[in-house]
Image (cartoon, rainbow, N blue to C red):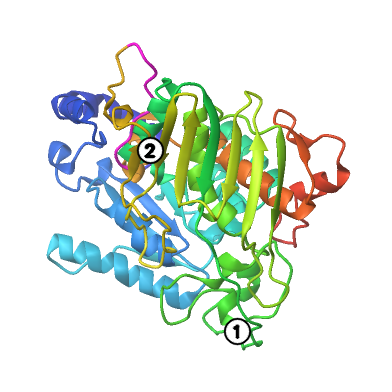
Amino acid sequence: MNHTRLLLRREFIKTAGRGLATSLLVSGFPTIVPASVLGRNAPSDRINIAAIGTGRISRSHDLPGIWKYENARIIAVCDLDRKRMAEAKQYVNAYYSKQTGKSYDGVTGYLDYRELLKNKDVDAVLVSTPDHWHALICVHAVKAGKDVYLQKPASLTIAEGRALSNEVQRSGRIFQIGSQQRSSPQFHYAAELVRNGRIGELKTVQVGLPGDPSGEEEPEMPVPPNLNYDMWLGSTPVVYYTEKRVHPQNSYDRPGWLRCEQFGAGMITGWGSHHIDCAHWAMGTEHTGPVEISGTAEFPNKGLWNVHGNFRTEAVYANGVRMIVSGDFPNGIRFEGTKGWIFVSRGNEQVTASDPASKLEDPQALSASDPAIIKSVIGPNEIHLYRSSDHHGNWLDCIRSRKEPIAPVEVAHRSCSACLLHHIAMKAKRTLHWDPEKERFKNDDGANALLSRPQRAPYVL
């Protein structure tokens, strides 16, 4: 199904589903029209989805987030681990078999995403790969005419993120970053309360992140015959294979690459992409960034896992707001103003069973210095932020309407780039001055050298 076919059906959808769609909008639920309106499982109504990367987050979050919608159908899966690709095919086919009550074998498997992107029946892709593959796959996907849902963070480097945002905006494709906290009611409400002055003038934002332990040296191991390890390494340097550098071969537990700087920056982008994104939302700084960054961090001096440990970084924005990010704070966001504070978190919610443990003593997802603050009603003439109650559903909605989703590409890039600025400050160990318009450090060639990384051919953006 292509963009033209979607547009041709829109008038019919507006007519056939107007009453239902209106009620869904009023109730705050996604406006994807159920198959019952258009005829159950009508092929002409489906958005055909392919999943690229079928590991832990894909199986536990992204695939279930899509297949619950009857008029979206997962028709393909891709993984460069042949075993995982086969298991993903089985996983999705089994779901649809259970739903239809009969044998189902409608999922095509791919080992190379470039071959998948040639499939003209695929309308959109879910990208749930390791971080170092995010930007390149998404650029290729939008060039192939596919809409994209990308797991956060947006990119491995700031330079990659800028290239990704430019390409998506040039393509006109619908892009959603997996910053699903924007579709959680407490984060939406907290952002509106801050934007509308319920805590007075915002002065400080504290962002608390979970931590990642270091590890020991790991021995070189034979590359499993089911894994295309050279392609898995992608644009990053060639290093020996060991299972804890990649992902478990016999489970879908948390993968080791998350703790290797070669493939990501650690928790500063892992959870920082969620929390800094929602902080930007409340601060009104979604399309810019800080102007000054500083901080310190501990890094392991041995072992395979080498992302940052304990850290504290600070950023100052042009409006004077100071953001402090540290693993010493409770996991969440605390907004401090001249008239009080608000703290917002996921509470006890986990996206996957292997999410790092929270430091929260109080499982409340939203609290404030005065309970009256979080009982406040946002008036009709106040600031109302984009509302979504389901992140994947919002993306599907926007594929149909061609409207911008709640977490579009430039917002994704700015959230990720802010995280990466904190990471660069950890490395530089000095105060850095950032120009968010030019996306360059001022008079600092050493820091500017960290905005990109050398890329290994042929995996070059």
Magenta run includes residue 384: yes
Mark carried by residue 187 = 2
Q: Image point 68% across, 50% down: which residue?
A: 157
Q: Is residue 177 visible?
A: no
Whole-percent x, y for residue 213 in the image? 56, 70
Quadrant for residue 245, please give it.
bottom right
For residue 48, side relative to residue 207 (left or right): left
Magenta-highlighted residues: 381-390
Residue 273 percent across, percent down from the top left: 53, 47
**Amino acid type, residue under disc 2 in the picture:** Phe
Q: Is residue 274 covered in magenta?
A: no
Question: Identity of the amino acid at label 1?
Answer: Val
Q: Main secondary structure of the magenta part?
A: loop
Report the residue at 39% width, 50% height from top: 121
- In the rendered view, tell whether residue 394 sits above or below residue 304: above
x, y percentage for residue 167?
61, 38
Q: Earlier in the sequence, mark 1 or mark 2?
A: 2
Q: Residues within 10 Å of mark 2 (few under 14, many from 20)?
A: many
384 versus 218 height, above or below: above
Q: Quadrant of residue 159?
A: top right
Residue at (51% x, 74% y) in the render: 247
Few, some or many C-alpha atoms within 10 Å of disc 1 (few <14, some 14-19, many ≥20)?
some
Whether residue 235 can be seen here: yes
- Residue placed most toward the observer, 247 or 81: 247
Q: Say how many tags the image has.
A: 2
Q: Secondary structure at mark 1?
A: loop
Which disc number belongs to residue 223?
A: 1
Q: Nearer the viewer, mark 1 or mark 2?
A: 2
